[in-house]
Image (tube, coloured by chain):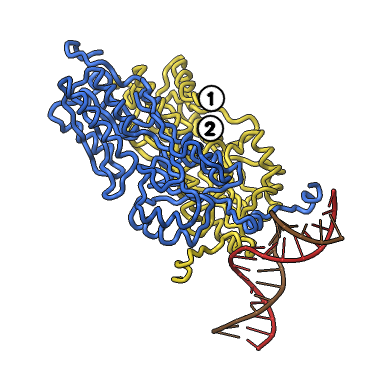
Chain colours: A blue, B yellow, C red, D brown
Amino acid sequence: MSAAAKLDFNISRSATALKSGQTFRVALLMNQEITSWFNVEVFAGVNSVLHKEGYDISLFQHIDDARTRTQFFRDMPVLRNVDAVFVASFAIEPEEVEQLRRTRVPIIGINTPNIEAFDATISIDDEKGMYRATQHMINLGHKRIVYTCSAAEESLESSIDARGRGFIRACEAAQQTRDIDWKVLSVPRGHDFADAALAAVLSEETFPDAICCQMDMMAIPLVLKLQRHGYRTPRDYSIIGFDDSSYADTIDLTTMRQDPFAMGAAAARKCLQLLAGEELQEPHSKIEPKLILRGTDARLDPDAPLER
Amino acid sequence: MSAAAKLDFNISRSATALKSGQTFRVALLMNQEITSWFNVEVFAGVNSVLHKEGYDISLFQHIDDARTRTQFFRDMPVLRNVDAVFVASFAIEPEEVEQLRRTRVPIIGINTPNIEAFDATISIDDEKGMYRATQHMINLGHKRIVYTCSAAEESLESSIDARGRGFIRACEAAQQTRDIDWKVLSVPRGHDFADAALAAVLSEETFPDAICCQMDMMAIPLVLKLQRHGYRTPRDYSIIGFDDSSYADTIDLTTMRQDPFAMGAAAARKCLQLLAGEELQEPHSKIEPKLILRGTDARLDPDAPLER
DNA sequence: TTGAAAGCGTTACCAC
DNA sequence: GTGGTAACGCTTTCAA
């Protein structure tokens, strides 16, 4: 070791990789940018486990846009060799999975809508999570409930779309026994989706008692902007988010918590087991988000004055 | 190509790397977690340029904590070979630079307080930025001005510390010609720094006219929390942030914008030039942040009633 | 226990 | 131009 230090000797990872057949590189495919809360948490989680084992992450972004997808699935196996592939938060088509499988490496899904063709997956139970969130609103006595969301990508199903189904199921179930009035307010994708949601809520004939939000990134601007229009929570309406992402605690938002860092780390551990040739005892995990009660939800009392 | 497709032939990057002597891997060292706004933007910027050139990023986090540092600078050259090293947002000690230099690869600094020993750097002008921000507050007529910041790490100077110097310089300059009352409110590091800053502001004998914040991540919670204490901006006080990070636009925060994604991308382009053996025409760039006027600053009119 | 040799898949060079 | 060969630095195997 001292001789090595003297000579500035560095072991060559390239040579090790060549000889061993491993590349010590994994691919992480994500929809959109890594700069979103969810994506960077997943990345950090994966890296937290794999980095210390000597793996680097090769990041492929915007895989959910048509052009990138085509190019990616055409060139990727040829250009970039990796020991494993992680797919975060979007569905891949059967023929694309087939393309990936031909690289003969483990394929691990994180929040992918489907689990077929993956060697392992870990997902949040989006549908049950939003079902619970909606149920919470209903149990507080709210009657006029809306779900605000940004529309799904044309063809490509994202894990997040299951949340809308959870909302609808909860409302339909509640309708059996009581009188509630619910509605889905879907606004176009794009970076102004929060303003679009605000406009949609404000243009409702009667202002809702309760708002279920597809994600905190929509709920947080809504709370702040509705305030400027004179609507205050929980005095005038209840609102629940989904994610428990940045600033949710700062604005005291009641929300469903998920932990994408932990999911990334768990996915990475599954990956290491698969690379070691071990059998997974639970290849496909589903995690339930947790209701975090904070200050934006209150019982609806129809007889009470406007102050809480 | 068709034969290659038939046989599922993949070119071996490991072999290419071995033969060429390049590793097609760069190291990115950062203080703290990648999950912070600044760090993930830098990462994304570096990746946006380097990924398409075939490079992967090996991420080393928490380099600004003493234990990690020691371990890193002892083991890194031996364990991980890279074609270039990026250092983001913290100062490195002379002997550490020496360690890095022995790997004989380009070393590029992003927002590092010093530029010596780096082959290239790109930095935001933190001091001038906060000088301008403070000047803006002074020009609006504010008399009682505070600067809220979280304390610097014991030994390790971070680029962000220059902002405090800019604040002080601006105040001292203004004092020559007019009567202003300024103060630095420094609170301990930690994840509750925003609450600590809130407490510090509230415990001032007279509430300030204007608050200059070290960063938006401090300004945003302050605006929201001060509101709950009855202080509204810009009616009761002006506040200016620094960064223009997430939600700054949503809460309509006047701030100094910097673009860490662009800085990462620019650093990566410098890196590619250095790797190609080209001379850099401007090895060390300094970028001025831009004043973004929004809704949290107003002219102080001592005769006006409390409403704006 | 120690040492030598073969081979991983490229790239680069040289001879034809 | 075209084809053959050596070498990058490690790991593994086999022999001493």
Confirm whether residue B263 shows in the render: no
According to the image, label 2 marks what residue? B164
The reply to whether label 2 and label 1 mark residues of one chain is yes
Q: Quadrant of residue B212?
A: top left
Q: Position of residue B147 (x, y in %)?
A: 48, 27
Neighbours of disc 2 within 10 Å: few (<14), some (14-19), many (20+): many
The kind of secondary structure element at disc 1 is: strand
Instruction: Give the chain letter at badge 2.
Output: B
Instruction: Give the chain letter at badge 1.
Output: B
Q: Position of residue A247 (x, y in %)?
A: 40, 29
Q: Are marks 2 and 1 in contact (CB under 8 Å)?
A: yes
Q: Residue at x 56, y 46 (%)?
A: A277
* Amino acid marked by disc 2: Gly
Left or right of A192? Residue B211 is right
The span from disc 2 to disc 1 (Cα, nearest Å) is: 10 Å
The answer to whether A190 is drawn above or below residue A74 in the figure is above
Q: Position of residue B75 (x, y in %)?
A: 69, 44
Tell me the mark number nearer the camera, choosing from 2 and 1.
Answer: 1
Q: Residue at x 24, y 30 (%)?
A: A169
Q: Position of residue A41 (x, y in %)?
A: 46, 38
> Quick one: A248 or B290, which is closer to the camera?
A248
* Amino acid marked by disc 1: Ser
Kindly identify which numbered label has been placed on residue B186.
1
Q: Residue at x 23, y 40 (%)?
A: A187
Confirm whether residue A118 shows in the render: yes
Which residue is situated farthest in the left direction here? A205
Neighbours of disc 1 within 10 Å: few (<14), some (14-19), many (20+): some
Q: Quadrant of residue A23?
A: bottom right
The kind of secondary structure element at disc 2 is: helix
> Quick one: B176 or A121, which is closer to the camera?
A121
